[in-house]
Image: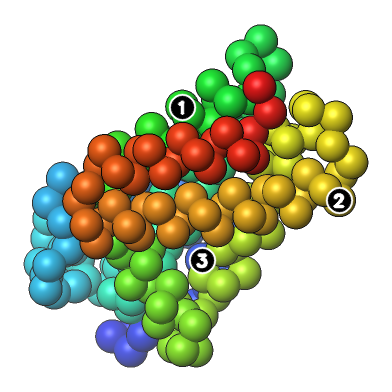
Amino acid sequence: MPSDQPSDQPSDQAAPARRPARDRLLAAAVDHLARHGLGDVSLRRLASALGTSHRMLIYHFGSKEGLLVAVVEAVEARQRVFLAELAADTSTPPRAQARHMWRQLSDSAPAPHARLFFELAGQALQGRQPMARLLDGLVEPWLDPLSALARRSGMAPEVARAHARVALAAARGLLLDLLATGDREAVDRAADLLIAAYAPT
């Protein structure tokens, strides 16, 4: 019987037999938070909205915090897939691809996922569990697809990777700016400057 005590077990250690059910609950949680936000909803109320029990959420995610971390990881993974697909499209100029990626990210910024990302990242930097595991995915998984775009201009791999790191940091800063100020026009202008500097034509 599942325990009510949070285990905060990392998502990638879930037993294979548990994975399909866990993935279904996670997908439902991602969609639910996109539509309704998080607010101060309890784990029980969230479980009810997802059509399950709070015990099942604890079984699969360890705690409410574990579920939220998994949601952020899932959204980040979806964004990286989108970026990798853009990078693989050699028929579209990298600068146009970068604008497409920025539009996808900034259009989703009003959704609760973006605010949740920054909130949990801050807690991760303080060493809080299970949020701390987010630190492993904040930078490195993004560098290969971002570097692939930069290398199309003939950059050496190490230079392209440095460009990728700067672009990632700046894009996240712009998303935080957008969330804090709501000034879409000004942030888009700044994004255009970033794209012009770090994406080849």
Residue 195: x percent and y percent?
Answer: 55, 36
Q: Earlier in the sequence, mark 3 or mark 1?
A: 3
Q: Amino acid at mark 2?
A: Glu
For the C terminus, the quadrant is top right
Residue 187: x percent and y percent?
Answer: 33, 45
Assign a secondary structure to mark 1: helix
Q: Which mark is residue 11?
A: 3
Residue 181: x percent and y percent?
Answer: 22, 57
Q: Earlier in the sequence, mark 2 or mark 1?
A: 1
Disc 2 + disc 3, Cβ < 8 Å: no
Assign a secondary structure to mark 3: helix
The residue indicated by pointer 2 is 158
The residue indicated by pointer 1 is 100
Q: Is residue 132 left or right of residue 107?
A: right
Is there any visible trace of residue 60 in the rendered image? Answer: no
Q: Is residue 52 left or right of residue 157?
A: left
Q: Earlier in the sequence, mark 2 or mark 3?
A: 3
Above or below, comparing residue 92 to residue 133 in the picture:
above
What residue appears at the point 33 percent right and 89 percent down from the top-left corner?
Answer: 5
Assign a secondary structure to mark 2: helix
Tell me the crowding category of disc 2: few under 14, some 14 to 19, or many 20 or more residues within 10 angstroms, Cα based: few
Query: Toward the viewer: 173 or 45?
Result: 173
What residue appears at the point 46 percent right and 89 percent down from the top-left corner?
Answer: 126
